[in-house]
């Protein structure tokens, strides 16, 4: 196989003679195993080489042998004429010719790489990039897109006043302000900082040691509970140790002797400690089974929220914009206003849904203000909502659903004005799309509002907490006995197991609570600004494609449009006055 650089033939630096020769070759005799497309590699396979025996390569071009006159014995093969002598070659001669031809083509391709250059190459091949869909649109909400080797992060600037020479924390945790002042870096718990994608490839290598934000370790309560577990284990250790070594204690003599070499006694103590550990292990198996079902069901609901209901609502927005790109493709002010209005209303519905969903878990006025559940001024500032539309939504309990009523009414106006072809059919299908989007919002809010039964959640959390505290008591008791008998590795094992168990089980129930409503303001929650940007870029691409389809040319620069029609209604004569 011979691989040539991408876009080589489209480059302006290609040698003109080589380019003309290559164009003649590609147009006269396209190989079955040859593929050339803009932006891809050119690949030449070694298959069917014996069918190209009549080609002899000379330098950077090639020649095709003249067909033999009709008096000679000839036959057609692949669009060329081969003489009888070539047909009657032996298998050995054919194999040698094929290998020779392949070597010549490979050497020719290697030499021609000097004539090609990568037009779109960058100075630094390791420069970080992001998908084109994620490019921030000028007319949309502002955010900062941070690129890292292992993460793509969106800073929505909620609770932040970024100033020249630094920034001031308004709604972060108290120690984050100290972090900013001392180190001059962004706070660990920056409000509005959301991870939109992470590199699983890097995570599997060494990033699992470096990632903090977005992981279970970022929970302050996790470390507070771990501290309480250590305190409980230390208290149990002190009580067990001093009781056992007291004058009336069970291991007083062992403590006086500095340990024991009696294997029988050591085996007996080891068996007793094993029974203590087995009891905790039995409870751990039961809790792991129940907790696994508990978290697994919530993960399924999480994927259902994102991939089914939320995606269906976004699909409805893009479906309507797809229609607008076909029905109103012209670049005049009227068509552009219709397209932009439908797109803006669809994106407004997505933004308002995030506010409606975050309001569900706002338990205080302060939390509601931080999440901006009732504040629509940010949408006005970002150009998603107009000032005269804002009063229509203030105090509305179903903001995101009301917008779809606006969309349906707007399409009805277009049908009555005779702006759409086949208005009756279009009205019916568009109302179906709006109804579908409204139903998906209902499903989303219903799923978020529907929790596990309190008794079930309380039992699971209760058993997890009991298991963690049992592990702490067990670790304290076994550590005390291990120190008395000078078997310190028993103590180290218990401390490690207690730490891992606390982080693992508490982390699982934290994950369950976090993904129960992924439309809040956490580091791994969904970013409505990123959804806005992606949908906006996709729909704008639809509009651009509708304005300039590939069949347009200088004589017919405008795209084809179905003629608009007025609605024809049946008139009932009984309604007229006689």
Image (cartoon, rainbow, N blue to C red):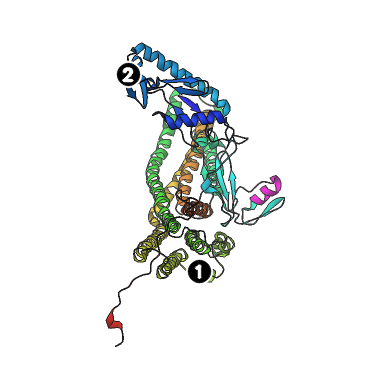
154 left or right of 542?
right
Residue 383 shows in the view: yes
- Residue 179 covered by magenta stretch: yes
In the rendered image, the residue lying farthest to the left is 574
Residue 289 position by quadrant: top left
What segment carries the magenta color?
175-186
Please state, as top left, top right, bottom left or bottom right, where the C terminus lies in the image.
Answer: bottom left
> Looking at the image, is 183 positioned above or below residue 489?
below
Please state, as top left, top right, bottom left or bottom right, where the N terminus lies in the image.
Answer: top left
Frontmost residue, 507 versus 202: 202
* SS at mark 1 in the image: helix
Q: Are marks 2 and 1 in contact (CB under 8 Å)?
A: no
**Cα distance, mark 2 to mark 1?**
90 Å
In the rendered image, the residue lying farthest to the front is 71
* SS at mark 2 in the image: loop
Frontmost residue, 543 versus 265: 543
Q: Which mark is residue 71?
A: 2
Q: Which residue is mark 1?
A: 393
In the rendered image, residue 144, in percent from the top left (x then y), is placed at 60, 50
> Looking at the image, is 471 positioned above or below residue 522?
above
In the rendered image, residue 369, in percent from the top left (x then y), is placed at 57, 62
Disc with the residue nearer the chain's start (2 vs 1): 2
Q: Residue at x 32, y 20 (%)?
A: 74
The total number of labels drawn is: 2
């Amino acid at each position: 196989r011979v691989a040539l650089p991408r876009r080589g033939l489209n480059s302006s630096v290609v040698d003109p003679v080589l380019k003309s020769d290559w164009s003649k070759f590609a147009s006269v005799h396209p190989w079955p195993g040859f593929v050339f497309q803009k932006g891809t590699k050119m690949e030449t396979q070694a298959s069917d080489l014996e069918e190209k025996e009549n080609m002899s390569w000379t330098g950077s071009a090639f020649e095709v042998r003249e067909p033999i006159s009709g008096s000679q014995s000839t036959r057609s093969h692949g669009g060329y004429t081969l003489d009888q002598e070539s047909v009657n070659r032996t298998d050995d001669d054919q194999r040698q010719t094929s290998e020779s031809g392949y070597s010549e083509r490979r050497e020719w391709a290697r030499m021609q790489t000097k004539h090609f250059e990568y037009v779109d190459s960058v100075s630094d091949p390791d420069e970080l990039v992001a998908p084109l869909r994620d490019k921030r649109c000028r007319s949309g909400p502002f955010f900062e897109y941070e690129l890292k080797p292992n993460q793509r992060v969106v800073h929505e600037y909620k609770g932040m006043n970024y100033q020249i020479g630094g920034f001031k924390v308004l709604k972060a945790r108290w120690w984050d302000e100290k972090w900013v002042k001392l180190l001059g870096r962004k706070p660990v718990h920056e409000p509005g900082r959301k991870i939109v994608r992470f590199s699983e490839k890097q995570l599997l290598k060494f990033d699992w040691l470096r990632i903090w934000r977005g992981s279970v370790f970022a929970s302050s309560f996790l470390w507070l509970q771990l501290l309480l577990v250590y305190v409980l284990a230390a208290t149990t250790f002190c009580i067990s140790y001093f009781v056992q070594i007291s004058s009336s204690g069970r291991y007083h003599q062992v403590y006086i002797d500095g340990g024991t070499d009696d294997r029988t006694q050591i085996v007996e103590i080891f068996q007793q400690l094993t029974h203590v550990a087995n009891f905790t292990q039995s409870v751990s198996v039961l809790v792991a089974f129940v907790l696994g079902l508990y978290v697994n069901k919530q993960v399924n609901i999480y994927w259902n929220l994102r991939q089914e209901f939320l995606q269906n609502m976004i699909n409805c927005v893009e479906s309507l914009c797809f229609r607008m790109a076909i029905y109103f493709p012209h670049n005049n002010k009227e068509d552009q206003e219709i397209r932009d209005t439908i797109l803006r209303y669809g994106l407004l519905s997505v933004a308002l849904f995030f506010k409606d969903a975050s309001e569900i878990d706002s338990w205080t006025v302060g939390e509601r203000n931080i999440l901006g559940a009732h504040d629509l001024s940010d949408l006005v500032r970002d150009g998603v909502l107009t000032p005269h539309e804002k009063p229509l939504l203030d105090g509305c309990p179903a903001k995101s659903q009301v917008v779809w009523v606006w969309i349906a009414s707007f399409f009805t106006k277009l049908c009555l004005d005779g702006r759409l072809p086949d208005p009756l059919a279009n009205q019916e299908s568009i109302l179906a799309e709006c109804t579908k989007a409204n139903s998906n919002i209902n499903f989303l809010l219903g799923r978020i509002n529907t929790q596990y039964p309190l008794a079930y959640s309380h039992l699971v959390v209760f058993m997890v907490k009991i298991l963690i505290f049992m592990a702490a008591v067990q670790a304290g008791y076994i550590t005390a006995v291990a120190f008395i008998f000078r078997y310190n590795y028993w103590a180290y094992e218990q401390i490690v197991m207690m730490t891992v168990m606390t982080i693992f089980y508490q982390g699982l129930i934290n994950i369950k609570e976090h993904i129960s409503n992924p439309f809040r303001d956490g580091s791994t929650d969904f970013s409505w600004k990123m959804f806005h940007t992606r949908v906006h870029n996709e729909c704008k691409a639809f509009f651009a494609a509708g304005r300039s389809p590939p069949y347009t040319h200088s004589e017919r620069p405008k795209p084809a449009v179905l003629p608009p029609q007025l609605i024809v209604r049946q008139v009932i004569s009984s309604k007229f006055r006689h």
